[in-house]
Amino acid sequence: MIYSINHIISYTICRLFIYIIPRIGHNIIKLKHISIFCFIFPIFKDLASQPTKFNLPNPRKSIGIQYARGFLFAHSPLMHAIGRGPNQSLEINFEIQTSGKKDWEWYHKLPLWRLLFNIADFSDPQHIGLVYSLGTEMSFPLIRSKIFYMGITGALGIGFVSKPFDPLTNNINGAVSAPINYLLRPGLEWSLKIHSHMYLLYGLKFMHWSVGALTLPNLGMNIPAFSLGIKAGWGVRNLPEENKPKFIRPKWQIDWLVCLGMKQVMPIGTGFYPTATLGIWAYKQFTPKSGLPIGLDLFYDESIKMRLFRVNHSYGYFRHTLRAGLFGGYEFVINKFSLYFHFGGYFLWPDKLDTRFYQRIGMRYRVGNRGLINFSLKSHFFVADFVELGGGFRIFRFNKKK
């Protein structure tokens, strides 16, 4: 039998994923069985489907339920004391198939939108308890045929942790220090049509709960997991023939951004310290889905004084609380909403307490023709620095040459 590239990639991903989590291979859902399951699914797609992407009858709305099983990734020695058992979660979601009425839906091949509610059990009722999450998710198709679907997913939401860190009653939990956390969850999903409006689901997910450095300790919780589920839909949405709306590439524009935040530093209990960011971004959208941001950042961080005191027994001066850097990055565009990643380096860095390089992952929303709202997390190589919340507006756009 000749296997497709999709089949080979699917099987390889699943085998690699199983290789890095042998610790849960003996649990209720045997990973070797899931491996066979992942191996067989793409064969069904090769043998029984046609590579049509559009003009398909899809459920207008669906309700799905999924079970996921994984483990708490111990990215710090302090994490070995909590969540040593398997992580299990149960999720219910409401799904809507986009219709293609808007150009951005065609740019992303008619994605799926979901509202989800998730309950996660870390097998550690004493130190973590249950985590309840509410969020929204988009699924962007890679392959869509009459019975098979493969897509990339991204979910954003908030989570409530029932047993966060407490210095008196729960000082073992160094992962999360606040009951309210944000949820980030990228993943891959596959589905197989088993009835008129019923689909069998499976996928790979990477779940992350954190509060940035808003409170300490905050190592965050990272969960790689498999998911299995089923969804049922109603109403028929006949997807129209493929449409290719014309994309007019905009000129470079200059955005001005101001963000505020706060953070804690060690030792725990020293209070909150204000932070601020002033940014000048030059931005160019090259395709309907991709943009290039470059720019200049000026940072203010009051906590640097406390950190300098711990090292040098001197609080330093106001200039030590300032940093400035240049950055470049990538922006993934979904209509007026976008997700972005920046990689930058300081050229003004008087305190020398952190590495010279910084990163930022965030999202922003365009309001009208000029305004924008921003939410982002600044870090130093995966060590959270502080959360940035704010907004700005476009101050200049280059006009087309006549």
Image (cartoon, rainbow, N blue to C red):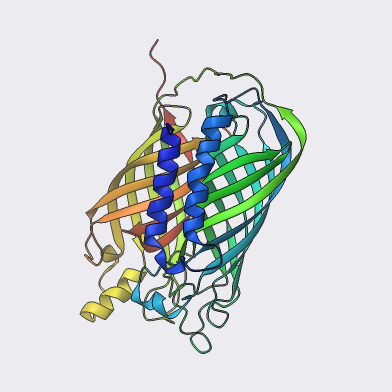
- From the image, which quarter does the C terminus lie in? top left
Is any atom of residue 299 visible in this view? yes
Above or below: residue 81 compared with residue 283: below
Is any atom of residue 207 visible in this view? no
Q: How many marks?
A: 0
- For residue 235, which quarter of the picture? top right
Residue 45 is left or right of residue 299, and the answer is right
Residue nearest the viewer, comparing 94 with 372: 94
- For residue 328, which quarter of the picture? top left
Above or below: residue 163 compared with residue 336: below
- Position of residue 239 measured from the top left corner of the image (x, y, whole percent): 67, 25
- Position of residue 164 measured from the top left corner of the image (x, y, whole percent): 54, 77
Residue 113 is left or right of residue 361, and the answer is right
Q: Residue at 41%, 48% (x, y): give it.
A: 13
Above or below: residue 100 compared with residue 348: above
Q: Residue at 36%, 59% (x, y): give it.
A: 379
Residue 230 is left or right of residue 268, and the answer is right
Name the residue furthest bottom: 168
- For residue 241, which quarter of the picture? top right
- From the image, which quarter does the N terminus lie in? top left
Name the residue furthest right: 235
Q: Residue at 31%, 72% (x, y): give it.
A: 305
Name the residue furthest front: 1
Above or below: residue 128 compared with residue 387: below
Residue nearest the viewer, comparing 123 with 217: 123
Residue nearest the viewer, comparing 401 with 328: 328
Q: Residue at 59%, 42% (x, y): give it.
A: 191
Residue nearest the viewer, comparing 295 with 125: 125
- Position of residue 120 measured from the top left corner of the image (x, y, whole percent): 59, 66
- Position of residue 367 measured from the top left corner of the image (x, y, whole percent): 57, 38
